[in-house]
Amino acid sequence: MASTDKLPLRSQDFSEWYIQLVQRAQLADYSDVKGCMVIRPNGYAIWEHMQRGLDAMFKDTGHVNAYFPMLIPEEYLQREKEHVKGFNPQLAVVAIAGGKPLPEGERYVVRPTSETIINRSFAKWIQSYRDLPMLLNQWANVMRWEMRTRLFLRTTEFLWQEGHTCHETEADAEAETRKMLEVYRVFAEEWMAMPVLCGQKTESEKFAGADRTYSIEAMMQDKKALQAGTSHMLGQNFAKAFETRFLGRDGQQHFVWQTSWGVSTRLIGALIMTHSDDQGLVVPPKLAATQVAIIVIGKTPEERGPVKAAADALAKELKARGVRAMVDDDDSKSPGFKYNEYELKGVCLRVELGPKDLAKQQCVMVRRDQSSDRSKKAFVAMADAAKTAESMLEQMQKDLFQKAKAFRDEHTFEVNSYEEMKKRADDGFLLAHWDGTPETEARIKEETGLTTRNRPFDLKQEPGTCPVTGKPSAGRIVFSKAY
RNA sequence: CGGGGCGUAGCGCAGCCUGGUAGCGCGUCUGCCUUGGGCGCAGAAGGUCGGAGGUUCGAAUCCUCUCGCCCCGACCA
């Protein structure tokens, strides 16, 4: 059993806490394949719920799913100058196939992202403005040979969805880019209960091959930032490289305007680092595999019999309401052991049911996000149990978001001098002026470890002075240390 | 590729500095006892100390080489 020792404390060593938690909650393991991880059923269950939520939102916005090959002819990658420059160092290349070495130029790369191979198809499929917009999404694995990896946050191979769309006009593509960023915001905030900043990335932080990149940025409990999703306005860069053209309403040939956007299993890491505590995993109800665990308590079979019957009845009622509930009748483990076990695994609501409760026709309910406070046990009449459980889950979803938002807001500051930036480098999100040059951005990163996250849409842009160079600044941007 | 750390029982570790033939916790097995916050007690099994070479009467311990893993950094859509 993996759960006899306590976790390291978040406040003492956040990295260690995170790694131990991921493994002890049986979400994922390191693989023997360097840089890769094994997502275990508990971890994959969270991904499945994420997929379900996201996929529904993509369909609502008119997108359809498709699937393209994992191997991309090397030559495709080379076609877009910035794209190949950005990804070349991270590629895994297939140099032998069918027992024969492939000559240079005829090799394949394992997709690091699919813009190029999808554009090959777009170029064939799209003839006229009547074929537009083309709105595709792909659920897939991709591979990027990163130097340093971290469970869920950055692994050599990862699972994601990548949306790829083609539009008639620049304005349409821009609107799509922003629309999908908004979909990500809603998903992050309403499903993951994770507040995010929506905004534009800087030139040096944008996607290789895009005109503009937008991101959602979240704050983890160690006050570091995590880029949780990106949406790219690709302009006509790939269209030109692959000759993805259409006959316009004006009777002329035009290159399509494109977007791409993606989120990955990194979101699982984000979820953990946003909500979980020293007891283990905390998962928002909308994404939890098990929302309610009912624990049967009793010494003898005579005692347990009626308790089990009541527990089963409650579980049935919960399931009828669409709540993911389970009954734990295992008498080989003590109730106390199970409390800790379910807290580690992130079950949202624990129901304790024993002979004493049954005599009073009640049960005990403990919300996972309040379980460290032992006074927060709720005594609930059995008649109301299902309804109460359901409303407690709803409340928990809201409270998790509010708590995370309050944390982020408490750790967001305006800073007005370079000294102040250096001093507060580890304190969270710093709103600072910047002269807009990559040189200054690079210098700040070098000297303080701070990187630009994005320029949030809702951050009022007022002119000021760059604290580093004293040059004029168009407005503040978010700086933070980041994963 | 730099910097640091670690390889000793299924898992987590101590022992190493100052050499004397291996120990603790958890888990496992047996029995009793327990079950509302990680039950308790008693007993038992389980190891070529990552590998190779060297020093020595004697090496987990000292020296050399080697393999592997982890953390931090550099890198990064």
Image (cartoon, grey):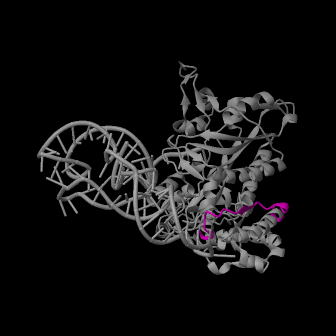
Q: Position of residue A110 (x, y in %)?
A: 60, 33
Residue A327: in magenta span: yes
In this rendering, the answer to whether A325 lies above or below B66 is: below
- Who's the residue at 80% across and 50% down the image? A56
Residue A70: in magenta span: no
Q: Position of residue B31 (x, y in %)?
A: 52, 63
Image check: A289 left or right of B8? right
Image check: A22 left or right of A325? left
Q: Position of residue A336 (x, y in %)?
A: 60, 70
Camera-side residue of A133 and A219: A219
Image quadrant holding the N terminus of chain A, namely bottom right
Q: Position of residue B30 (x, y in %)?
A: 51, 58
Q: Quadrant of residue A309?
A: bottom right
Residues shaded magenta: A317-336
Camera-side residue of A257 and A371: A371
In this rendering, the answer to whether A194 lies above or below A230 is: below
Image check: A316 left or right of A162? right
Q: In the rendered image, is residue A312 in sight?
A: yes
In this rendering, the answer to whether A427 lies above or below A78 is: below
Q: In the rendered image, is residue A244 in sight?
A: no
Image check: A250 left or right of A270? right
- Who's the residue at 71% across and 38% down the image? A236
Camera-side residue of A165 and A241: A165
Camera-side residue of A419 and A224: A224
Image quadrant holding the C terminus of chain A, namely bottom right
